[in-house]
Image (cartoon, rainbow, N blue to C red):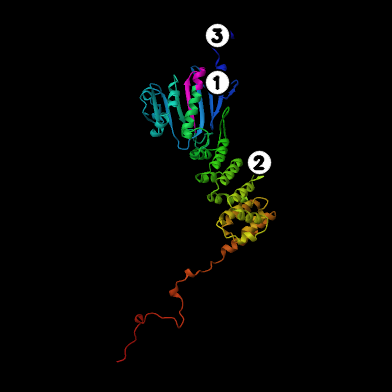
C-alpha cells in the first residue's frame, strides 16, 4: 500500500476524507452500488460532492459532480463552460450568449443566461471569476427542478458542477467548495455575509419565504426548516415593520416551531400592523413544544397593548359572553375567525354559542363545515347545530328599512305642509 501511494499518490478516498475535514463536512463511505461522497454546509445550503457514471455499458465515463439546491423564486438561469466545449448546448435551453465585461474571462469562457444584467453583477465578483478560472475543465449551471415528477419544492433549483473523470486534487476540490459558497451567497443573499445587519431585512424575508421540509436522495440534499426559523427570529430582532406581511404568512405553517418564532418576532417588532394577523390565532388549538399555540399569541397581543381584546376572547371561550357582546373595537372579523378556529378544540361548544350571541352570520360557512365533520353526537356538535339554526333564521329576516331607503318626495304630506308649486297645477275652464 505504501508503495502504491509512493507511485500514485493518495487514493481518491483519502483525498475526499481530507476534504471533508478541511470543509467541516461529512464523508459518506458509500456502498456496493453507491459511490462515496462528501457533504458540507455553508450558510443555508448543503453542498454535495460525489461521482456518477454514464454510458452504454461498453463505453462508460465517470464524472465528478457537485450540487447544491437553493431557493430561486425568480427562476434565474445561467451556465458557463470553457470556450470550445459544449457549443450550442445553451441555445437549446433558451439561454443567450452574454459578455460580462471582463475581456479575459469573456475570451476563455462561454457564458449563457436569461438575465444579462444580473449575470454581469455575478461575474463582477473577483472571487467567483478566480474560482472558475482555476478549474481546468468546468461545466457550471443552474438546473431547474420543477415539473410533475420533481422531488424539489416549488422555487427550489440546483447549482450544479460537472467535470469528466473523478477529481482527486485536494486543492481543486477545496476551490470548488469555496466557489459554490461564494456563488450561493451572491445570488441568494446579494453577496452579504451571515451576520444580520439592519439592511439585511430583505435577505431574511427571502429566507423566510423559502420552502421548508427536507429533500433526500442518497443523502439529505436540502433542509429548509432551520433557515426559515432563523430568519423569523432575526427579523424580530431587527424590528422592521416591512417584515410583518412575510411573518404573518407563516403563522399557520405546518412547522409550528416556525409559527411560534413568527409570533415572537411580531411581538418584538411592536407595530400595530401585526395585531390583525394575530387575533384569529387566539382560537388556534395546536400545540408546539407541549404548549398551546394560542397562549403565545395571547402574550404577543398583550405586548402589543391588546390586553382587553385577549381577555374578551378568553372569557368567551370559557362561556362568559358579556365582554364579547359589548365589544365595539376594530377586530370583530379577527375575533370571529378565532372563534371559528376554536370550534374544533376543547372550547368548541362555547365558541359556537359565542358566535350565536354576537349574531355572527358571516361565520355560517365555517359552522356548517365543522358540523359536517362533527355531526350532533356530542355537546359541541349540538351547540354548533343550534348556532347554525339561530344564525340562519337571523339571516333570513327582512332587513330593516333605513331612512335612506325611502324617497322623501313619495311620502304623503300633512295638510299643513307646503304643497306643490301652484303654477304646475292643471287649470280649470274659466267662466266667461
> N-terminal of the two: label 1 or label 3?
3
| Residue at numbered disc 1 | 19
The stretch drawn in magenta includes residue 49:
no
Query: Where in the figure is residue 244, as x and y percent of width and height?
Result: 52, 46
Label 1–label 2 contact, CB within 8 A: no
| Residue at numbered disc 3 | 6
Q: Residue at x 44, y 75 (%)?
A: 410
For residue 422, side relative to residue 44 (left or right):
left
Q: Is residue 172 above or below residue 221?
A: above
Residue 416 in sight: yes
- What crowding class fits label 2: few (fewer than 14 Cα within 10 Å), some (14-19), or many (20 or more)? few
> N-terminal of the two: label 3 or label 2?
3
Q: Is residue 429 above or below residue 24?
A: below
Q: Quadrant of the N terminus?
A: top right
Start and end of the magenta stretch? Answer: 157-174
Label 1–label 3 contact, CB within 8 A: no
Q: Residue at x 59, y 60 (%)?
A: 327
Query: Where in the figure is residue 276, as x and y percent of width and height?
Result: 55, 51
Compute the Cα span from label 1 to label 2.
38 Å
Most extreme residue toward the right is 378
| Residue at numbered disc 2 | 289
Amino acid at each position: 500500500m505504501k508503495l502504491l501511494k509512493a507511485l500514485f499518490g493518495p487514493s481518491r478516498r483519502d483525498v475526499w476524507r481530507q476534504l471533508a475535514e478541511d470543509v467541516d463536512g461529512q464523508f459518506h463511505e458509500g456502498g456496493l452500488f453507491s459511490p462515496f461522497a462528501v457533504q458540507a454546509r455553508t450558510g443555508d445550503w448543503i453542498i454535495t460532492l460525489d461521482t456518477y457514471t454514464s454510458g452504454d455499458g461498453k463505453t462508460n465515463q465517470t464524472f465528478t459532480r457537485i450540487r447544491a439546491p437553493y431557493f430561486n423564486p425568480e427562476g434565474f438561469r445561467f451556465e458557463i463552460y470553457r470556450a470550445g466545449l459544449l457549443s450550442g448546448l445553451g441555445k437549446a435551453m433558451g439561454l443567450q450568449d452574454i459578455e460580462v465585461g471582463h475581456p479575459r474571462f469573456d475570451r476563455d469562457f462561454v457564458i449563457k443566461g436569461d438575465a444579462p444584467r444580473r449575470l454581469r453583477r455575478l461575474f463582477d465578483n473577483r472571487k467567483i471569476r478566480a474560482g472558475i478560472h482555476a478549474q481546468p475543465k468546468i461545466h457550471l449551471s443552474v438546473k431547474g427542478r420543477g415539473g410533475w415528477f420533481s422531488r424539489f419544492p416549488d422555487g427550489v433549483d440546483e447549482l450544479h458542477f460537472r467535470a469528466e473523470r473523478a477529481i482527486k486534487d485536494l486543492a481543486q476540490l477545496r476551490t470548488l467548495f469555496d466557489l459554490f459558497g461564494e456563488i450561493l451567497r451572491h445570488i441568494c443573499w446579494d453577496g452579504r455575509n451571515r451576520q444580520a445587519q439592519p439592511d439585511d431585512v430583505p435577505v431574511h424575508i427571502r429566507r423566510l419565504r423559502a420552502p421548508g421540509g427536507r429533500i433526500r436522495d442518497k443523502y439529505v440534499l436540502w433542509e429548509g426548516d432551520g433557515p426559515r426559523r432563523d430568519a423569523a427570529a432575526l427579523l424580530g430582532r431587527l424590528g422592521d415593520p416591512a417584515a410583518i406581511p412575510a411573518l404573518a404568512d407563516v403563522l399557520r405553517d405546518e412547522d409550528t416551531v416556525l409559527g411560534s418564532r413568527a409570533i415572537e418576532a411580531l411581538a418584538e417588532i411592536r407595530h400595530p400592523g401585526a395585531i390583525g394577523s394575530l387575533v384569529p390565532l387566539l382560537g388556534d388549538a395546536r400545540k408546539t413544544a407541549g404548549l398551546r399555540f394560542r397562549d403565545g399569541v395571547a402574550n404577543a397581543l398583550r405586548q402589543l397593548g391588546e390586553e382587553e381584546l385577549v381577555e374578551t376572547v378568553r372569557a368567551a371561550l370559557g362561556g362568559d359572553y358579556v365582554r364579547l357582546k359589548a365589544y365595539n373595537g376594530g377586530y370583530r372579523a379577527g375575533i370571529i375567525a378565532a372563534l371559528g378556529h376554536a370550534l374544533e378544540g376543547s372550547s368548541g361548544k362555547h365558541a359556537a354559542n359565542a358566535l350565536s350571541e354576537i349574531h355572527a352570520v358571516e361565520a355560517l360557512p365555517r359552522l356548517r363545515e365543522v358540523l359536517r365533520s362533527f355531526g350532533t353526537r356530542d355537546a359541541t356538535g349540538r351547540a354548533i347545530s343550534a348556532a347554525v339554526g339561530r344564525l340562519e333564521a337571523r339571516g333570513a329576516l327582512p332587513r330593516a328599512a333605513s331612512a335612506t331607503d325611502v324617497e322623501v318626495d313619495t311620502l304623503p304630506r300633512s295638510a299643513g305642509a307646503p304643497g306643490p308649486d301652484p303654477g304646475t297645477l292643471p287649470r280649470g275652464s274659466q267662466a266667461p
